Amino acid sequence: MSKDIKGSTVVGGVGAVATVGTAATTASAVVGGSAATIMSATAGTTGAALAATAGTAGTAGGAAIASGMASIGSVVGGGMATGAIITAAAPIAAIAAVGYGVFKFFED
C-alpha cells in the first residue's frame, strides 16, 4: 500500500465494493420474482432476521419476514424485493462503516 493512501480510505473503498456487490447479487436473485422466490433467496440470512424484526406485530416466521421486507422496501418507494436488497446490504454497510471509523480513529 502506498504511503499516500490512508488505511481508512482502503477500508472504506473495500466496504463500498462489498456493499454494492451484495446488493447486486441479491437484486439479481429477487427482482421480478414472486414472494416465494424472494423468501427462498433470502432464507437464513442476516437480512431475513433484520426484516423479521421490522415485521408486523403478532406475526412470526415467514409472515414476519415478508411483511418486514415489504415495510422496509416501502420506505424508499419499493416493495418486498427492494426490502430484501436493503436488508441484505445493510449489515455489510454497517460493518464497513465501523471498520472505516476504527481506522479513522487511529490515524494521525
Image (tube, rainbow, N blue to C red):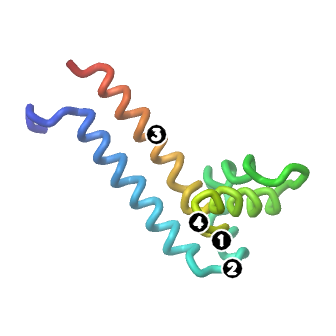
Q: Quadrant of residue 5?
A: top left
Instruction: Say which residue appears at 66% left-offset and 48% top-offset.
Output: 50
Residue that mark 1 sits on = 38
Kind of residue at badge 1: Ile
Label 2 – label 1 distance at C-alpha: 6 Å
Label 3 – label 4 distance at C-alpha: 21 Å
Left or right of residue 87, residue 68 in this image: right
The tag earlier along the polypeptide, 4 or 1, is: 1
Residue that mark 2 sits on = 34
Query: As drawn, which residue projects farthest toward the left?
Result: 3
- Pointers 4 and 2 in contact (CB under 8 A)? no
Residue that mark 3 sits on = 95
Kind of residue at badge 3: Ile
Q: Is residue 79 above or below residue 16?
A: below
Label 2 – label 3 distance at C-alpha: 30 Å
The tag earlier along the polypeptide, 1 or 3, is: 1
The tag earlier along the polypeptide, 4 or 2, is: 2
- Pointers 2 and 1 in contact (CB under 8 A)? yes
How far across and down, in percent of the image, does residue 94 sit? 48, 41
Q: Secondary structure at mark 4?
A: helix
Kind of residue at badge 2: Ser
Instruction: Say which residue appears at 86% left-offset and 49% top-offset.
Output: 57
Q: Tell me if mark 4 has few (under 14), some (14-19) or many (20+) residues whose alpha carbon lies within 10 angstroms of its own.
A: many
Q: Tell me if mark 3 has few (under 14), some (14-19) or many (20+) residues whose alpha carbon lies within 10 angstroms of its own.
A: few
Q: Is residue 29 above or below residue 87?
A: below
Q: Tell me if mark 1 has few (under 14), some (14-19) or many (20+) residues whose alpha carbon lies within 10 angstroms of its own.
A: many
Residue that mark 4 sits on = 82
Left or right of residue 85, residue 38 in this image: right
Label 1 – label 3 distance at C-alpha: 24 Å
Label 4 – label 1 distance at C-alpha: 10 Å
Q: How many marks?
A: 4
